[in-house]
Amino acid sequence: MPRLLLILTLLFPASAFAELEFSDAWIKNLPPTVPVRAGYMTMHNPGPGTLSVVSVRSEAFASVEIHRSFMQDGMMRMEPVNDIEIEAGASVQLAPGGLHLMMMMPKEPTSPGDEIVIFVKLGDGSEQSLKMPVVK
Ligand SMILES: [Cu+2]
């Protein structure tokens, strides 16, 4: 192996893939009559460059959107956001009252204790998966 490549490989063992770290992931359980769930988590970018989350999908839901909640005229409203940018070394929190995953039309009823697999797509086209526990 050429020496420079060897050094780069030692310095950046996962350099080919920019990856986010996920923590505190959870989905609020709701009764089967409610056709949406909200999902929350913290996303941390440990890498040297900005990463963007462009979409999220899950086989357990017909679709998943990234939403932002905000107050307008004293009412809590929400709207889809195109992407979430996370700067190098920064974290973004998806939490009640702010950014969240809007998970539409569960294919099966959810219950506390379930784990829902989601796929997070980054701006470079790569996907990362994680499990989100359903919480009462
Ligand atoms: Cu929403």
Image: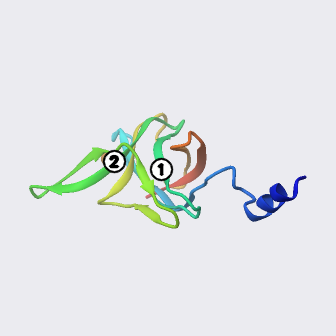
Judged from the image, the secondary structure of the residue bearing numbered disc 1 is strand
Q: Nearer the viewer, residue 41 or 20?
A: 20
The residue carrying mark 2 has its beta carbon less than 8 Å from ligand 1: yes
Give amino acid for label 2.
His
Q: Residues within 10 Å of mark 2 (few under 14, many from 20)?
A: many
Q: Residue at x 35, y 55 (%)?
A: 99
Q: Which mark is residue 52?
A: 1
Q: Spatial distance from mark 2 to mark 1, Cα to Cα?
A: 15 Å
| Residue 24 makes an appearance in the image | yes
Do the residues bearing badges 2 and 1 touch, measured as CB atoms within 8 Å? no
The picture places residue 76, in percent across and down from the top left corner, at 19, 54
Q: Does 29 appear above or below 127?
A: below
Of tags 2 and 1, the one toward the viewer is 1
Q: Nearer the viewer, residue 126 or 74?
A: 126
Give amino acid for label 1.
Ser
The picture places residue 91, in percent across and down from the top left corner, at 47, 65
Image quadrant assignment for residue 14: bottom right
Q: Does 61 appear above or below 98?
A: above
Residue found farthest to the bottom: 89
Residue at label 2? 67
Image quadrant assignment for residue 10: bottom right
Judged from the image, the secondary structure of the residue bearing numbered disc 2 is strand
Quarter holding the C terminus?
A: bottom left
Q: Residue at x 53, y 53 (%)?
A: 132
The picture places residue 107, in percent across and down from the top left corner, at 48, 34
